Image (spheres, grey):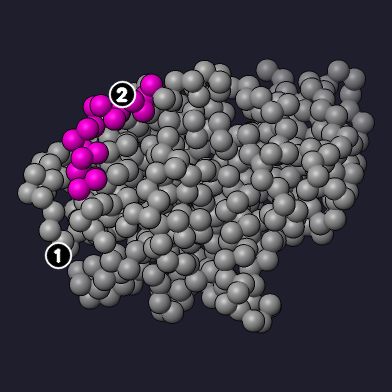
Amino acid sequence: MTEATLLIHDVHILAGAASQDTPLGDILIRGNTIVAVGEVPPQPPGSITREIDGSGLLAAPGLINAHMHSQSGAMSGFADGLSHPAFMWLTQAHTSRRTPDEIRLAVLLCATQMLTTGTTALIDHFPGQRFSTADMDAVLAAWEETGLRTTLAMRFFDGVFSDIIPAGIEVPASVTALVSGSGLLAPHPLAELREQMPDLITRWHGRAGRIGLCPAPSNPDRCSDEALVFCAELAESHDLPIHTHLLETKAQARIARERYGESTLAHLERLGVLSDRWSCAHAIWLDDADIALMAERQAIAVHNPESNARIGTGRMRTPEMLAAGVPIALGTDGSGANDNLVMQEAMRTAALLHRSDLPDRRQWVTSRDALRMATVEGARALRLAGRLGEIAPGQLADIVLYRLDAPWWRPLNDAASQLVFAETGAAVTTAIVDGRIVLEDGRITTFDAPSVLSEIEAMEASLRARNSDLFAAADAIAKAVP
């Protein structure tokens, strides 16, 4: 079967974060790969399957959301002013006990946000509870339906969620009994994981050329050493990334010191598992030795600047980490912690967050730093370094087209800076993932987005009724925890 060939002609091209200009040119895509950029030689008659007129448009690399949670897709607007433990229990109430169709609806809601604002690839840290194989099949089938490039980070814990259990706080006995007896956060036996994860990888990894899987500790401190070693061995044998939350809160840093007598990162190093396969969401409470260790091992920090600020967990030491050579990708986190999945907002926040603290402007995170986090460093977190994140021959064809008639693009001064500081996702008109058009003239082509949006309220109402006990527990904990 002849591969489809797509030609975008007469378009302004922002090839990547390092680009200083946006020349007019053409982009030729064959199958899922970019084969020519700029001056495209004449092609044989009839060989072009589809042409896109790029006049008045900017072509940019698709953005990569390196940390989000599809399970919290319907949680925008919740949890303002809550502590981290209270927020986590409210999230349990919103995301637990879902049916396969409800898992699908949450994925499609997230995909609608991302596709229409320029994100083409992601890491979904799923779910928030102990999972079944049926849960994972449902979420993977939904992501395949969307057309997005997706790595499902199979989130698990075989230990306890000690960092979100309020310590020294009076909580009603009925709530304590519910939290401990619900089974939602019961440890996942390692023996089950050893069966489930390889089976899921065998059946799903590489599906449609866009679906990937990886082991994903909820947090290393919630997992046994045996489970962490298993993750490293599984990732090595299948050439997979490893994704995790890391030192998001001060409590997690304290618990690690009490448990290991050293930091979480130092413990991973002592186990012999820390490597460039790890992408570590949040990475806030790192000391200088931790930063040096991440740089040495080229473990990837995934910056989530908006959710960190929203919940008040702290600020990642981005300038120091960049200076030390730590690779930094970028994520939005879930809608419960950030309210939207718009990567342009995450880029802008990452670039601006530390500036008022740094009188030496040479230490500032620049717009190009932020764009690099959202493209080539995100590709690194997906284990696709050198294959994704730029518009160049040989790269996978994940490309987004922006309308240059939007007022924030007039005049076209510095496309990289305008993409980070001015764009909101509102000017996105077309998205191409793996050479396939998945958004055209602002309309998603892979699923019925308006129908999905119309079903979300009913899903949420059903969950509220079904999980009334968990909402009551979350409310009690929120009142008890200052």
x 30%, y 28%: residue: 463
Q: Closest to the observer: 36 or 470? A: 470
Residue 352 lies in what quarter of the image? bottom right
User: Horizontally, is 257 left or right of 349 in the view?
Assistant: left
* N-terminal label among 2 and 1: 1
Q: Position of residue 353 (x, y in %)?
A: 57, 66
Q: Amino acid at mark 2?
A: Ser
Q: Closest to the observer: 131 or 225? A: 131
Compared with 405, 461 (above or below) is above
Q: Position of residue 418 (x, y in %)?
A: 75, 53
- Residue 32 is labelled as none
Q: Amino acid at mark 1?
A: Gly
Q: Position of residue 105 (x, y in %)?
A: 43, 26
Question: In the rendered image, is residue 63 in sight?
Answer: yes
Q: Which region is colored magenta? A: 458-476
User: Horizontally, is 429 left or right of 157 in the view?
Assistant: right
The residue under label 1 is: 168
As for residue 473 lying within the magenta part, the answer is yes
Residue 140 lies in what quarter of the image? top left
Would you say the magenta stretch is mainly helix, strand or loop? Answer: helix
As for residue 81 lying within the magenta part, the answer is no
Q: Position of residue 389 (x, y in %)?
A: 65, 49
